[in-house]
Amino acid sequence: MNGFSLLFGPEGWGGLLLEGAIVTILLAVTTVPFGFGSGLALAVLKLSPNRVVRAFCEGFTTFFRGIPDLLSLFIVYFGLQALIDRASKLAGLSSAIELNAFFAGVIALSVVVAAYSSEVWVAALNAVPKGQSEAAHSLGLDSRKTFFLVLLPQLIRIALPGLGNIWMVLLKDTSLISTLAVIDLLRAASEASKNTTRPILFYSAAAAIYLVFSILSGLVQSNLERRANRGFA
Amino acid sequence: MKAIKLLALLGLASTLMASAAGAKEWKAIRFGMDASYAPFESVDPSGKIVGFEVDYANALCERMKVTCTFQNQDWDGIIPALLAGKFDVIFSSMNITDERKKKVMFSDMYYATPIVFAGQSANKSDDVSPAALKGKTIGTQSSTIHANFLEAFYKDSNIKLYPTQDEPNLDLASGRIDYVVGDGLVEADFFEKKGNGCCRVISEIKRVPGIHGPGVGAAMRPEDTDLRDMFNKAIAEVDADGTYKKIEAKYFKQDIRGKQLTN
Amino acid sequence: MLQTLYAEAADLFNFEMMSRYGWRLIDGLWITAQVVTISVTLGFLLAYPVCLARMSRNRVLSAAAVSYVTFFRGTPLLCQLYLVYYGAGEIRPLLTDLGVWWLFREAFVCCIFAFSLNTAAYQAEIMRGALASVSKGQIEAAAALGLSKFRISRHIVWPQAFIVALRPFGNELIAMIKSSALAAIVTLLDLMGQTRFIFARTFDFLIYVYAAIIYLVIVEIIRRVWGLIERSCSRHLIAATPATHSRGQDESRISRAGRHGLSHGGSPQSQGA
């Protein structure tokens, strides 16, 4: 069979590749709020006056930034399950809570992304002048309002380039989930190439789709940065 | 800060996706398979797992009056995943060995196929003794009986272990490795798919009792004895009413039931 | 209670596993070291021409360089590795005709090939950013003083670019160490490969933790050593502008996230953002 019909024919693998691509995007997009959110939480805690909290957060970041992402995923994937089992046994639950592979992947990616993004958030937190929150307080805003109305919008503007880079990392790191039997884009290409013994065709197709995602992300990112920087020459 | 806490909680709640495993009446059984083992189990272009063991499992489930779902799981992690409760049964051409019995519990054997050495067609030698294969590269899937067999008897050969069986096959076809050890029917299926007569089955390996075991069974968590009893009953029933023969005929020309090789 | 704790601890360290398989980790570490050193070096050598092409006024050249960099930074390394490893198998007749099949036969070579091409793309961007960071005025001033092109680049541009590039290069090295773990997926028994091997035998998840600690220690050592090198190379700058050594700056030194990142690496302009 020629390459075209292997991809687009009725018995072709294009459909699976497309489904895989959707899974890849879903993995990445689902990870964003958890990963970036917990990254921000980590960053805030890293600036906390409590030394123990600070040390714990620094340790967490150092650990997950210092080991291969593939290893982080394995550790979270298998370790988390063992931890949940133990915890549910301790809590006296008769049946263990079970993680499905997709969400285990999301958690694992979130952990990695949280570790990476906390650095970006810390830098951003340091870059917002103290005067801003002092001014907000003296205007009578409580600390919650100060954070969400005054600090966060500025943080996001400052952190955007860094977070954009991490998004790119994340997009490509989703491919590591393919080793955990989630059929993402790369896994779909693997299945297709094993079944048809045409690896070049399918891995190139997968690479092309990743490339489109990356280029689109780049465009969205610069657009976002432009919007966020309105009013800043 | 409250909002962050809320976000974190929300994340926890939605990601844990609590689904209680093993409501002990077994209305639904989750099967774990390494779907890179055609014709026994593989992924089709629509992303579904298909193959002999899927059809057979469905027949068993019909007998057991349970609904069945199939999950793809890489071989290296398949026993840990079973023990971690990610599914209830490994139904993935897993040979019944004493080593595995330490971790999991097996049903009765439901098939036994020949194990073979395969090589390139250009390789005319039929000698696959350890002496003849000294210094040669032999590939197979890791954590399998084949890997254990090679490590026990082919110490002077260069053994390469792959995550799935498809990968050594691809490397055999490309000439990256000299031999593959694997299931005879899986190898035959691959060579047919590959076409162009790249490779051939060289010779059958006699099962070594301590390494290969008698054949393939379904693996379960040791505590699920009720589930094993259900399986054994269903296996016997599906044999008796001729369903096994029908499914077998759909995939193979030869008999693979292998009753003669009981434990 | 004490006994349970003791059992837990024995469980935790699993000395039996380590005495049986520990040497495998050392073996794996050696392979990892080889893969990383060779890939980063080859990548560096390749990055220079790519960087020159990228900055060249020749449109075809620079477009080719941009495509190269975009492809290797825009797709997952694992996908590139599969493409090289299984792709080489598919086009074996061609490679045999070219007389290079014996090279691509080896998983080790395939890994080095893929990793070198990949890191070259990142390193080229680092070089470009560093070279661009040297202000035009300096070059013009040097030219006005009558310095030759070679001497300008040797004495004016490179020493300054080197200092700017040092930090992203260190990050790239660390990123490469981390991504070299992917080699395990194509049968190479590097540190990660051996770890998976041991896990498949023992099903003891702790082996992953041991591997993590080894990677962590290596990465931390490199980070510290790199910090020392950087400090000694840029003493004059730090002394002149102590204000730049704020916490935020210090953090950004290590914040280049993983290799796949479309970089802080190389575009120092964006670091201050």
Image (tube, rainbow, N blue to C red):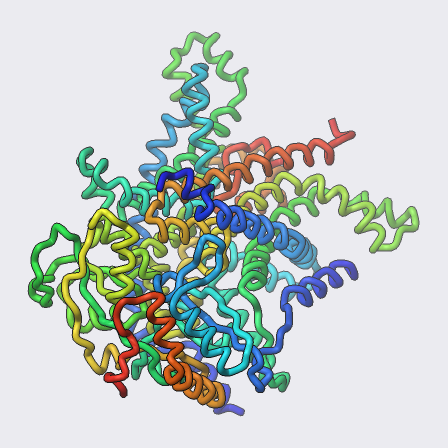
Rendered view: C129 above or below B107: above
Q: Is residue C244 visible?
A: yes
Rendered view: C17 above or below B5: below
Rendered view: B25 above or below B57: below
Q: Nearer the viewer, residue A141 or A178?
A: A178
Q: Residue furthest right?
A: A140
Q: Identify the residue at horizontal 21%, vertical 72% (top origin).
A: B149
Q: Is residue C29 visible?
A: no
Residue B122's x, y, as percent?
Answer: 12, 50
> To which quarter of the image does residue B181 belong?
bottom left
Q: Identify the residue at horizontal 20%, vertical 50% (top origin).
A: B197
Q: Nearer the viewer, residue C64 or B18?
A: B18
Residue C272's x, y, as percent?
Answer: 62, 36
Residue B182's x, y, as percent?
Answer: 25, 65
Q: Identify the residue at horizontal 30%, vertical 55% (top origin).
A: C188
Q: In what quadrant of the picture does the C terminus of chain C appear?
A: top right
Residue A86's x, y, as percent?
Answer: 55, 80
Q: In screen coordinates, is C84 left or right of A96?
A: left
Q: In screen coordinates, is B19 left or right of C253?
A: right
Q: Identify the residue at horizontal 54%, vertical 69% (top origin).
A: A80
Q: In what quadrant of the picture does the N terminus of chain C appear?
A: bottom right
Q: In screen coordinates, is A111 left or right of A228?
A: left
Q: Nearer the viewer, residue A162 or C111?
A: C111
